[in-house]
Amino acid sequence: MNPLPNTAKSTVVGAKPEGASDQDSSAQAVRQMFTSIAHRYDLLNHVLSFNVDRLWWRRAARTFRHILTRSDARALDLCCGTGDMTFALRRQTGKSSPRIFGADFSHAMLQRATAKSAGHPASSPNWIEADALSLPFPGAHFDLVTSAFGFRNLADYDAGLREIFRVLRPGGECGILDFGEPQGALAALYRIYFKQVLPRVGTLISGVRGPYAYLPASVERFPSPEEMLARMKNAGFADASWTPFTFGIAGLYRGKRCRFSPTTPWQAGARL
Ligand SMILES: C[S@@+](CC[C@H](N)C(=O)[O-])C[C@H]1O[C@@H](n2cnc3c(N)ncnc32)[C@H](O)[C@@H]1O
């Protein structure tokens, strides 16, 4: 086991929206929250990030081009929401046609994703309603698993990493794109925007109180890159790394399931 850095965040199990008392109620609150803002989610994403979100999805997807250009590849985008990261993966495939799946546990978010891909049935990803902590796929099924801004919302981060590891084939890779906390000169300014301005604008446009206050709180609670990398190694990932995007406002975690990784019950794909 890799010891986790000894900080307050190393005891954090997963997301815990205000009012939630355990993992079940946390997951339920998260699903309810995204369902309530699904109708405004895309607009808010683009407005609040000044459209930089598009660059982040594209950059993350491009990182895995070597997998996505293989026709025999299978890729899963977890917590896909309205599908923008999933579409970014699709755009990297070139002329090849790997199978791409997008999974989310909010029906309303998936409805938006389905509507967005309706005009392109031939290249549409396969949308699956599923919980990231208990995926309806056999072990060793995917060459790539990604998640953009979704992993942070899981009620149990270590269980999430183990489930990603389980469904990856030996040699497969994972990419987790999520927010970070930038350091340096920009940090103070960014914190004012993220904690004061963004929740107010988000609440105003979505008409829903809560989700946009939860966002900065969940980022603050999320493990630091150092801690996330230790957790990834403990889940079995090799070559774990973190690449900051835009001064660390976001960043991409990468890890591999080794071709010859030791077999534990979850690594073998078995469910306990
Ligand atoms: C911030 S949105 C991200 C959506 C999309 N990936 C993007 O980049 O815009 C987070 C998504 O994670 C989903 N989610 C959170 N926890 C989940 C879980 N345990 N299983 C499946 N989806 C989950 C939510 O329903 C929501 O759609």
Image (cartoon, rainbow, N blue to C red):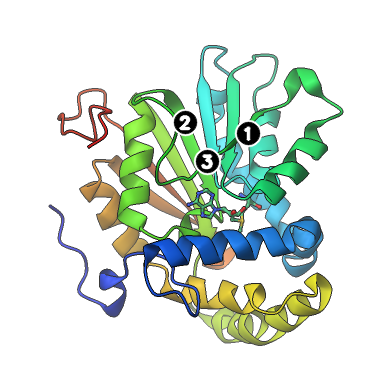
Q: Position of residue 191 (x, y in %)?
A: 58, 83
For the question of whether residue 167 can be seen, the reply is yes
* Mark 2 and mark 1 residues within 8 Å of each other at the beta carbon: yes
Instruction: Residue at 66%, 75% (x, y): give it.
Output: 212
Say left or right for 147 vs 133: right
Which residue occupies the foreground of this view, 89 or 210?
210
Element under label 1?
A: helix
Identity, as a three-letter code, of the amino acid under mark 2: Leu
Say left or right for 66 vs 32: left
Q: Which residue is mark 1?
A: 89
* Mark 3 and mark 2 residues within 8 Å of each other at the beta carbon: no
CA distance for labels 2 and 1? 10 Å
Q: Quadrant for the C terminus, please.
A: top left
**Vertically, is 230 above or below 22?**
above
Instruction: Residue at 72%, 65% (x, y): give it.
Output: 49
Q: Residues within 10 Å of mark 1 (few under 14, many from 20)?
A: many
Element under label 2?
A: strand
CA distance for labels 3 and 2? 17 Å
Q: Which mark is residue 130?
A: 3
Determine whether the beta carbon of the residue marked 1 sits less than 8 angstroms from the nearest atom of ligand 1.
no
Q: Which mark is residue 65?
A: none
Q: Position of residue 254 (x, y in %)?
A: 41, 44
CA distance for labels 1 and 3? 19 Å
Instruction: Residue at 54%, 16% (x, y): give it.
Output: 70
For the question of whether residue 256 can be seen, the reply is no
Instruction: Residue at 45%, 32% (x, y): give it.
Output: 136
Q: Position of residue 62 (x, y in %)?
A: 60, 36
Q: Position of residue 53 (x, y in %)?
A: 69, 56
